Amino acid sequence: MPEGIEAVNEKVKKESVFVQALVQEIEKVIVGQKYMIERLLVGILANGHILVEGVPGLAKTLCVKTLAQSIDTKFQRLQFTPDLLPADLIGTLIYNPKDGDFTTKKGPIFANIILADEINRAPAKVQSALLEAMQERQVTIGDSTYKLDEPFLVMATQNPIEHEGTYPLPEAQVDRFMLKLRIGYPNKDEEYKIMKRMAVTDKKITVSPVVGPKDIVKARKVVDEVYIDERIERYIIDIVFASREPKTYELDELTTLIQYGASPRASIYLSIASKAYAFLQGRGYVVPQDVKTIGLDVLRHRIIPSYEAEAEDKTSEDIIKRIFEEVKVP
């Protein structure tokens, strides 16, 4: 291992010690769901937002709330409804007749970790207000612009089983989420543990802060230093381009199945998320398997299947798996 990479590797080993303690603290409350916990940590370390799809009752709210408690940050849960207004989210100006002046009342978006529950139930204006805050890391109320505190993570949830009264997120807005997760049911043993742990009328589990916001910001700087070889960077570009130009990669059968390929955000997010994943493993360098492991979550919502794909019952996940099978690994 070259000297520079060895130094980064040692630094990552030292700086990522808190990860295990953080996971253990979250697992005091959450049974199973290792995949969701790991991806939440990737999101917060890679400074990206997460969209989660799953049926109710899978501990999505509890997981993100426990994460916020474990890193000693401010948490806000926002229940999105059809009558929600942008002002309910970002805040508004209130007129004071005594002074003849306006005062700013900040909304719940001014927190470190936001759970946007059932984001697809809110109208487009509210979705846009949230997505602007996610992208710009700032909020404008009246004439004033306010920076949002770091770390800032939005975990938005979508319920896949009820579509009445929903406003599906447009593809261009979904693209702003770094990761899209699909959460499934626990297995039998996990469900048994959940029942034993939670089936009481008054259950209180104390979660202690393991790290602070400054530690997360510091860890992000180390994530940026994680070494990624040029061949792996080219591999990422090949994966993304295979979704746009399947014929070039001898994936002729995908030509009619893909309506739109992955955007340039896919390349950026796949690179930074792979570094964050390597950091979680205590490594100072990225290996191709990191790209494969995190790739499905980065690309799932960025490759849009065509009508032909739907007719053949092919999902974006099937397309991504086929791309990973065919694109040459460095």
Image: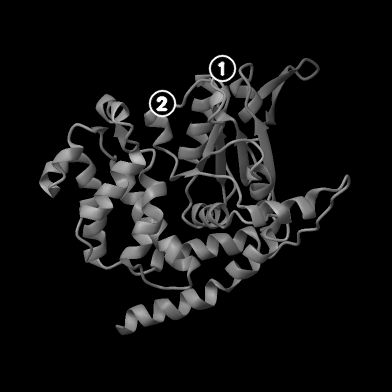
Per the image, the residue denoted by label 1 is 164
For the residue pair 252 and 269, the one nearer the viewer reads as 252
| Picture quarter with the C terminus | bottom left
- In the rendered image, residue 103, in percent from the top left (x then y), is placed at 70, 26
Question: Given contact means CB atoms under 8 Å apart, are the residues at marks 2 and 1 in contact?
Answer: no
Is disc 2 placed on a helix, strand or loop? loop
Amino acid, disc 1: Glu
**Depicted 97 relative to depicted 13: above or below:** above
For the residue pair 105 and 81, the one nearer the viewer reads as 81
- In the rendered image, residue 166, in percent from the top left (x then y), is placed at 54, 20
**300 displayed left or right of 130:** left
Amino acid, disc 2: Pro
Residue 146 seen from this side: no
For the residue pair 322 and 115, the one nearer the viewer reads as 322
Q: In the current view of this chain or complex, which residue is farthest to the front?
A: 188
Label number found at residue 170: 2
Cα distance in 3D space between marks 2 and 1 = 17 Å
- In the rendered image, residue 152, in percent from the top left (x then y), is placed at 56, 47
**313 displayed left or right of 208:** left
| Residue located at (26% from left, 48% from top) | 322
Looking at the rendering, which quadrant does residue 205 occupy? bottom right
| Residue located at (39% from left, 38% from top) | 301
**314 displayed left or right of 166:** left
Label 1 crowd (10 A; few <14 / some 14-19 / many >=20)? few
- In the rendered image, residue 211, in percent from the top left (x then y), is placed at 66, 64
Label 2 crowd (10 A; few <14 / some 14-19 / many >=20)? few
| Residue located at (53% from left, 30% from top) | 160
Q: Earlier in the sequence, mark 2 or mark 1?
A: 1
| Residue located at (48% from left, 32% from top) | 132
Is disc 1 placed on a helix, strand or loop? loop
Count of labels shown?
2
